[in-house]
Image (tube, helix red, strand yellow):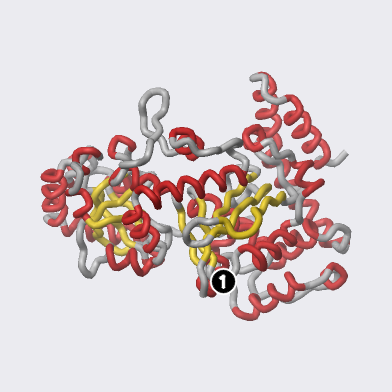
């Protein structure tokens, strides 16, 4: 199966994938050498009448709710298009902080529209890759050949618009999804050209089995780990050691910048509340940026990222003298309560998997024509799906709800609006007082008025 990248980026109504909504989707397919294949994709998605966007987000993206209604696809149309045309077999869905942000929005969008929220990233040779930690690790371990940006006060930053500026890459409109995609492709090409060995190594860590071979409890060994949790002082990089299993088949790792004796002495009364300062869950399927410890021996890398080799090994010896702490971490993780079930079925993606009969009915829902959906009232096994179907009909097929469904939808819609309304109006007023774009603020005010009952 021939592989290709699909670089993609989203603009959304806010930061919460459970409550906020997708407004713009843009992307570009490339071959494995990062040469474009076909035309770029740039789509708007209609914002539902149950959603007040974050005014601050609209100030950044410049995408108004009204523009999505005029030029956008419904969520159902969008899901059908990207499933058939974008996330095709062999596609590597690639973004910048996509694992933690964009992918979550995509999953919740698929969930609301009766698509499997996971298959687009694994089935038929598909996979995903996140370049943010690739950029961070390249900066930390092999920065040669690339100009690295810093903030005005001298702190390291990996913001995409600053990466492009420092390296002479065109990036005409930061925070426009398609412009960000093109910039990311160029930054990826830069890393591939300047540090091909590291690039190829991290590319293989898309596969969680490759990650498990490097970090596991059967043959535990210290490894280099780069992620947003760690300090910019150390280029977001530390040396960690696997200590205990985590939920969902993941692993807990200990940050060897810390001496456990000192940590226990300081936090002896609240260890279960503060352990996250030194212990992190490493998720095998999150494309983590990892490397063997030997990479730090070259080019004075230990010193460049501000780590003391001797201290790291001393801290490892100290950790291994505390099997009681390791057992405590295993127990804490096992006893950690799961999140309470979400009251809103649209936020309940992670409250359980669907059984096969419900999966079959979901396929019927998404294949159904407008006229067929009007009188379609299946008996789902999963109670989340009953309300989801009402919402799906209301958002995507105007005028097909019966009286009972319309009453249920209107109650849900107004509850969502009212929960957000006070903050929404306050944000508009504060942005107006700060002199922000009056046209955008007026459009946001009109959007609010259009959603509220007379």
The one nearer the camera, 304 or 424, is: 304
Q: Please determine whether, in this image, residue 35 is positioned above or below residue 299.
A: below
**Residue drawn at (33%, 37%) of the image:** 232
Give the quarter of the image for residue 38. bottom right
Residue 252, x across and y down, in percent: 30, 58
Can residue 327 be seen here?
A: yes
Q: Is residue 8 left or right of residue 436?
A: left
Helix, strand or loop for disc 1: loop
Which residue sits at x=28%, y=61%? 330
Q: Nearer the viewer, residue 8 or 353?
A: 8
Compared across the picture, whether 279 is left or right of 411 comes to left
Q: Is residue 21 left or right of residue 227?
A: right
Residue in the picture at 22% in, 52% down: 295
Residue found farthest to the bottom: 357
Q: For the C terminus, which image quadrant?
A: top right
Residue 391 image point, x, y percent: 75, 59
Compared to residue 244, the image places residue 164 above or below, namely above
- The location of residue 272, given as percent across then percent down, is 30, 49
Q: How many marks?
A: 1
Residue on which disc 1 sits: 89
| Residue 43: percent from left, percent from top | 70, 51
Q: Nearer the viewer, residue 66 or 340?
A: 66
Q: Residues within 10 Å of mark 1 (few under 14, many from 20)?
A: some
In the rendered image, is residue 384 in sight? no
Residue 434 lies, with reference to residue 252, above or below; the image says above
């Amino acid at each position: 199966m021939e592989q290709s990248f699909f670089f993609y980026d989203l603009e959304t109504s806010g930061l919460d994938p459970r409550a906020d909504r997708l407004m713009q989707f843009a992307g570009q397919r490339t071959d494995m050498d990062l040469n474009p294949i076909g035309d770029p994709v740039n789509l708007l998605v209609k914002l539902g009448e149950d959603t007040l966007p974050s005014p601050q987000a609209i100030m950044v993206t410049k995408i108004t709710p009204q523009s999505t209604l005029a030029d956008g696809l419904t969520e159902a149309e969008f899901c059908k298009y990207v499933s058939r045309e974008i996330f095709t077999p062999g596609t590597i869905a690639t973004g910048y902080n996509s694992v933690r942000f964009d992918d979550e929005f995509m999953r919740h969008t698929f969930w609301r529209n009766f698509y499997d929220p996971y298959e687009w990233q694994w089935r038929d040779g598909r996979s995903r890759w996140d370049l943010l930690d690739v950029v961070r690790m390249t900066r930390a371990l092999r920065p040669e050949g690339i100009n690295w940006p810093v903030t005005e006060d001298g702190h390291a930053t990996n913001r995409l618009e600053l990466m492009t500026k420092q390296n002479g890459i065109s990036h005409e409109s930061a925070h426009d999804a398609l412009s960000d995609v093109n910039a990311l492709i160029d930054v990826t090409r830069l890393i591939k050209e300047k540090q091909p060995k590291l690039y190829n190594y991290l590319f293989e860590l898309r596969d969680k089995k490759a990650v498990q071979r490097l970090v596991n409890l059967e043959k535990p060994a210290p490894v280099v780990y780069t992620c947003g949790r760690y300090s910019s002082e150390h280029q977001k990089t530390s040396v960690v050691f696997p200590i205990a299993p985590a939920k969902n088949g993941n692993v807990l790792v200990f940050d060897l910048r810390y001496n456990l004796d000192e940590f226990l002495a300081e936090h002896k009364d609240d260890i279960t509340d503060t352990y996250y300062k030194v212990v992190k869950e490493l998720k095998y399927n999150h494309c983590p940026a990892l490397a063997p410890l030997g990479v730090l021996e070259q080019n004075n890398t230990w010193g460049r990222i501000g780590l003391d080799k001797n201290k790291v090994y001393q801290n490892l010896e100290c950790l291994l003298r505390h099997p009681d702490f390791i057992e405590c971490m295993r127990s804490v993780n096992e006893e950690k309560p799961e999140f309470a079930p979400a009251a809103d079925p649209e936020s309940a993606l992670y409250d359980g998997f669907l059984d096969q009969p419900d999966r079959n009915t979901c396929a019927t829902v998404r294949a159904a024509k407008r006229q067929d959906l009007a009188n379609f009232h299946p008996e789902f096994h999963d109670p989340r799906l009953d309300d989801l179907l009402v919402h799906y009909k209301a958002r995507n097929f105007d005028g097909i709800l019966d009286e009972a469904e319309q009453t249920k939808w209107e109650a849900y819609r107004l509850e969502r609006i009212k929960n957000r309304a006070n903050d929404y109006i306050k944000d508009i007023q504060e942005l107006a007082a700060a002199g922000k774009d009056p046209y955008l603020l007026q459009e946001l005010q009109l959007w609010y008025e259009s959603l509220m009952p007379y």
